[in-house]
Image (tube, rainbow, N blue to C red):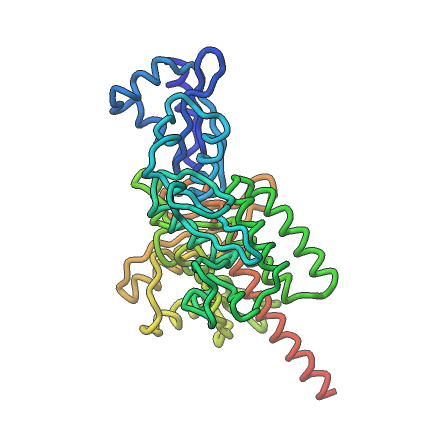
Amino acid sequence: MINLKEKIKKLPKSSGVYFFYDKKGRVLYIGSSGSLKNRISSYWRNPDPKINIMLTEAKELKYRKTNSVLEAIFLEAELIKKYQPKYNTKLKDDKSFVIIAFSKEEFSRVWVTRLSEVSQPIDFFGPYPSARLARRALDILRKIFPVRICKNIPRRPCLEYYLKRCPAPCQKKISPASYQKNINHLKLILKGKTDLLLVKLRKEMKTASRKLDFEKALLLRNKIFALEHIKDISLLTKETATIFQGRIEAYDISNFGGKLATGSMVVFEDGELRSEEYRKFKIKNLKGGDTGMLREVLERRFLHKEWNLPCLILVDGGKAQLGTAKAVIKKYRLKIPVVAIAKSKKKKMGDKFYTDLKLLPEDKKNLSCLRDEAHRFALSYHRLLREKFLFSKAKEN
């Protein structure tokens, strides 16, 4: 027991799956959490009698980190099915638990149900203890890999198609092969093999780029980003709550020797990038350096009262950029936290974060990726302006 308590001090606060073992190395219990340290620590703070019995029998504790709470939920169910732990017996037998089912049709239907309610041949994953979480998780995944949920294929596209959660096989808007790819990708995630899927998608993206199929490469890049940054507050408990609760706006400035300066705003909300809300700013006042340009972009942004206010602002830079953003926010009498990220000169040191917030390691990783997306978007606009500038100069000459 003492050894286990010592291990808890070294546990990460990231999402993952944890295992308790007995003295013979058999798995006693498997659980999942958005914060491994907080969840496992809670067993010793206020354990009920059943947990107390399990803890006295437990001699070893191990864990496996995941990229998201969602992945942890799916991986937990698959591992329980594989190991059949002694103290997870309720999950094996309880009829109130649900599964995610796949019908065996050309265009498979995917839905949340109870095994006792299924009368047709299916593939399934689970069981999962919460129908609400299973349905919400499936909704999130279907935004990345759309599939049908309808019992019977309708004659025309339904609301799910317009919500981009179904590719409308009813109207032949997707081939059987492409649809099956979406099904296969979903199954990999439900098996807890998201990392393997990411490897496959990155290979596909590189192949598409080599073939100059940039539209497909961009689509794959967006799917990869979405998979790497699945966040949804409805999947989190109090112990797992992070800063990713609402709208985040990330800003970046791009210029060439102080000329053709541009600013970008990218938006991350409800677990996904909102590309339709991205904004580009052509800098009007080039005086004041990077901080002056950032001030201009933020002030122009806050003049748009019709835009939803963010819960967090992310800027590329260090203490100077952090101070600039805070000053603009104060000027408009708003209360929005700010995070500034500066790239370290030494690659091994990683990014430096400047903020008043307490950031988890997972938060830092995701914010760095969001900063990179803002930089990519600003750079693409800057290149466009530079090409126009060079073309106009060539015409003059």
Which quadrant would the N terminus be assigned to in this image?
A: top left
Q: Quadrant of residue 292?
A: bottom left
The answer to whether residue 191 is left or right of residue 303 is right
The x, y position of residue 9, in whole percent, is 40, 24
Residue 152 seen by the camera: yes
* Residue closest to the far top: 23
Q: Is residue 314 left or right of residue 397?
A: left
Quadrant, the C terminus: bottom right
Is residue 368 positioned above or below 36 on the image? below
What residue appears at the point 51 percent right and 72 percent down from the top-left corner? 286
In-image side of 111 versus 372 (left or right)? left
Question: As displayed, is residue 302 above or below residue 226?
Answer: below
How many labels were placed on the picture? 0
21 lies above or below 326: above
The residue closer to the viewer here, 338 or 89, is: 89
Q: In terms of depth relative to the viewer, which is nearer, 213 or 296?
A: 213
* Place of residue 83 in the rendered image (x, y in percent of width and height, measured from the top left): 48, 25
Asked whether 375 or 138 is in front, the reply is 138
Residue drawn at (40%, 58%) of the image: 269
Q: Position of residue 298 (x, y in %)?
A: 40, 67
Pinpoint residue 287: horizontal percent, then vertical percent.
Answer: 49, 71
Quarter residue 177 falls in = bottom right
Residue farthest front in this picture: 119
Describe residue 26's horizontal placement relative to residue 173 as left or right.
left
Q: Nearer the viewer, residue 351 or 320?
A: 351
